[in-house]
Amino acid sequence: MERSSGWFNRLYGSFLRLASATDWLGPLALRLFLAPIFILAGINKLGHIGDVAAWFGNPDWGLGLPAPQLLAWMAALTELLGGVALLLGLGVRLATVPLMFVMVVAAATAHWQYGWHALPEQTLTMPWEWREDLIAEAVARKDKAVELLKAHGNYSWLTEAGSFTVLKNGIEFAATYFVMLLALLGTGGGRYASLDYWICRRSHGRGQPPQDANR
């Protein structure tokens, strides 16, 4: 029994050392996943800043936010510059804070009333969904729309690039990005593949960098 335990401990220890050697891959993957999302969102907002400001400020068909022009510019620049920072691994911890704030504002103002699910789920997939009614309503509307399109349109052509659906538009994506950013706030940009790591390493000379520099 002791021999089996010793063998398992050595094997598990080897696995932990291997996993530790790859700890930089997780932050890199998160950065490469999030960076283009925020960069493209920022560029899109800057290219249509007037429309974004109008949507932010209009209380009837928009969000009804105060100072919409200022908020539109702040959101656009936060997403663009924050996305570039994530891509380069430069000031990652600092960049995550305003990006998380943007996600909270987006979830609270644009998506909360639609519940959790963002995609048009056919059934409940998350137990904390608080707008289950919208799932059934979306399915009913999709079925009716498909019926109308089949009766009065070229349905095979309309669905060549993907099936017709009704977007639920809940907070799921904003919440997911928030959690991913929160992880980066804790880990930083990661070793080797971030400018933060090399800047910190250089600032501490050629010796072994402090533990935080590995993040």
Image: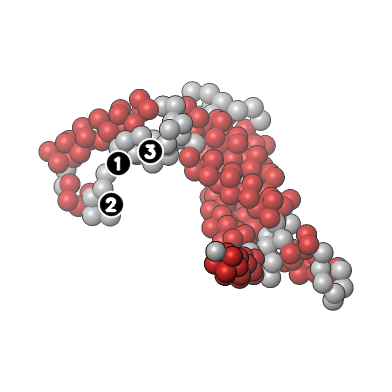
Image coords of residue 135 (percent x, y)? 34, 31
Number of residues whose C-alpha sits closer than 10 Å to that of mark 3, classed few (under 14), some (14–19) or many (20 or more): few
Image coords of residue 109 (percent x, y)? 55, 30
**Toward the viewer: 129 or 72?**
129
Q: Mark 2 points at which residue?
A: 162
Give the number of the disc on residue 214: none
Number of residues whose C-alpha sits closer than 10 Å to that of mark 1, classed few (under 14), some (14–19) or many (20 or more): some
**Toward the viewer: 208 or 34?**
208
Q: At label 1, which amino acid type do we have? A: Thr
Query: Does any portion of residue 114 appear in the rendered image?
Result: no
Query: Does any portion of residue 151 appear in the rendered image?
Result: yes
Q: At label 3, which amino acid type do we have? A: Thr
Q: Name the residue under label 1.
A: 165
- Is the C terminus in the top left, top right, bottom left or bottom right quadrant? bottom right
**Toward the viewer: 53 or 31?**
31
The span from disc 2 to disc 1 (Cα, nearest Å) is 9 Å
> Are the residues tagged 2 and 1 within 8 Å (C-beta)?
yes
Q: Mark 3 points at which residue?
A: 125
Task: Identify the residue shown where x is 35% and y is 25%.
Answer: 133
Image coords of residue 92 (percent x, y)? 70, 56
